[in-house]
Image (cartoon, helix red, strand yellow):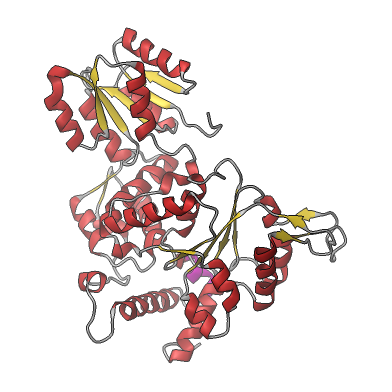
Amino acid sequence: MSENSLPILVVEDDPSLREAIGDTLELAGRPYVAVDGGEAALRALENQAFSIVVSDVRMMPMDGITLLKEIRARLPYLPVVLMTAYAEVDKAVDAMRSGACDFLLKPFEPQALLGYINKYELATHRDDAGVVAEDTASRDMFAMAKRVAQTDATVLLTGESGVGKEVVARFIHRNSARCDGPFVAINCAAIPDSLLEATLFGYEKGAFTGAQQAQAGKFEQAQHGTLLLDEVTEMPMGLQAKLLRVLQEREVERVGGKKPVELDIRIVATSNRDMAEAVARGVFREDLYYRLNVFPVAIPALRQRPLDILPIARYFIAEHGARFGRTGMQLSQVAEQALTSYGWPGNVRELENVVQRALIMAPGQRIEPEHLNLLGQVVAPASIAVTVDEKRGDNMNIKDLEREHILQTLAEVGGSRKLAIERLGISERTLRYKLQQYREEGHYRD
């Protein structure tokens, strides 16, 4: 059993059956929490994370169907398996429509219960709690990511800023043979050039002023696991050559060191830039590009997977609502329409920010459009999100939308780059690169 396993929540008002299920789980080495009803289950869910809920249908005063609907409103992605008698199959059908994963017909064998749990339970790593795939586009992408996870191939994740590249990287790690090893991430755009080499490769004592003791770099820290090189295209050219050698030789030498350290790691790299264009412009090495681009995975923008918008929003409402002490918050129908009609230039990161603001602004239990604070921001017409402009092409529309959003945000904060990057959720280096690009295109002046 993994040390990161989350417990199973058992909800059963019959003491004998509750004890029997507990015995089955205990013999299987599975941690669990058993409660006697729906209200107790909801209290448990507020205070602890679970991998799956196994609940009886016939309970008083809150039955299993009502509990299921409450769980779906608060924790949309937590699997729920219901236990029901043969005579209650009609209720089981209703439960499936309400979002239950499956149902167990009583009486059942212990192995049947364990089989259902193993089939449906959530990943036990909390880092992957943000994996949402309701839309066909995202399901296809995660299916591809899961296939490459079974190999040790280097993966290149591409997509706009804020689409959730690190979530996908962690998903790959969890589904790989290295899942018990470390997952180490480094944002190449967030660390000053002067510190990036030492951070990546480590250093020996006395290698430079201030190096009072030896320090392992990110490569060594990721030994037997996965190293995520986030926004790798922001890495300086000089350092790209050293990175290429590490990837080729599968060994790293600390700054100021003489003895190379052999590496056994999986590399996942990400970029929100067109890497082929970066190579053509001479800001990224072509040989490094091909070394990283062994298995490319393109992550669609949020507007390109519209069926994910509301499930992700509900996930964030449950996650941050628990953190803010605002459990049970729900979106009104009008607010849901506002979210799905918005263009989301900042993708999932922007959606998360919007949800957090709404949780703070909404006075009651229901989030309305005015609490989302979408007015005055760049809204993409539905035609931009789902159709291709015959004259300019969809990619051009997306770039125009991103540029307008960045420049408008910069204007709203009075030109403060510090405030702009906080609101946009991007790095200072990325903003600097974007503004330089807009200058060259004639869209921006300091």
Q: Main secondary structure of the magenta part?
A: helix
Instruction: Residue 43: give x, y in percent of width and height.
Output: 37, 27
Find the residue positioned furthest to the right. Answer: 206
The reply, left or right, for residue 118 in relation to residue 210 is left
Say whether residue 57 is left or right of residue 214. Answer: left
Residue positioned 68% across, 51% down in the render: 221
Is residue 38 shown to the viewer in this render?
Answer: no
Q: Is residue 111 visible?
A: yes
Q: Provide residue 183's location: percent of width, then percent of height.
A: 58, 49
Estimate the x, y position of residue 206 in percent, counting from the top left: 88, 61
Res 118 quadrant in image: top left
Q: Is residue 200 left or right of residue 384?
A: right
Image height check: is 370 above or below 393? above
Q: Nearer the viewer, residue 220 or 402?
A: 220
User: Measuring 45% from the left and 73% from the top, which residue is drawn there?
Assistant: 413
x, y (%) of residue 47?
44, 31
Marks counted in the figure total 0
Q: Nearer the viewer, residue 289 or 191?
A: 289
Above or below, 71 against 290 in this view is above
Specify the segment rendered in magenta.
416-422
Query: Which residue is at 60% across, 78% downward?
Result: 285
Residue at 42% in and 75% down: 406
Q: Quadrant of residue 399?
A: bottom left
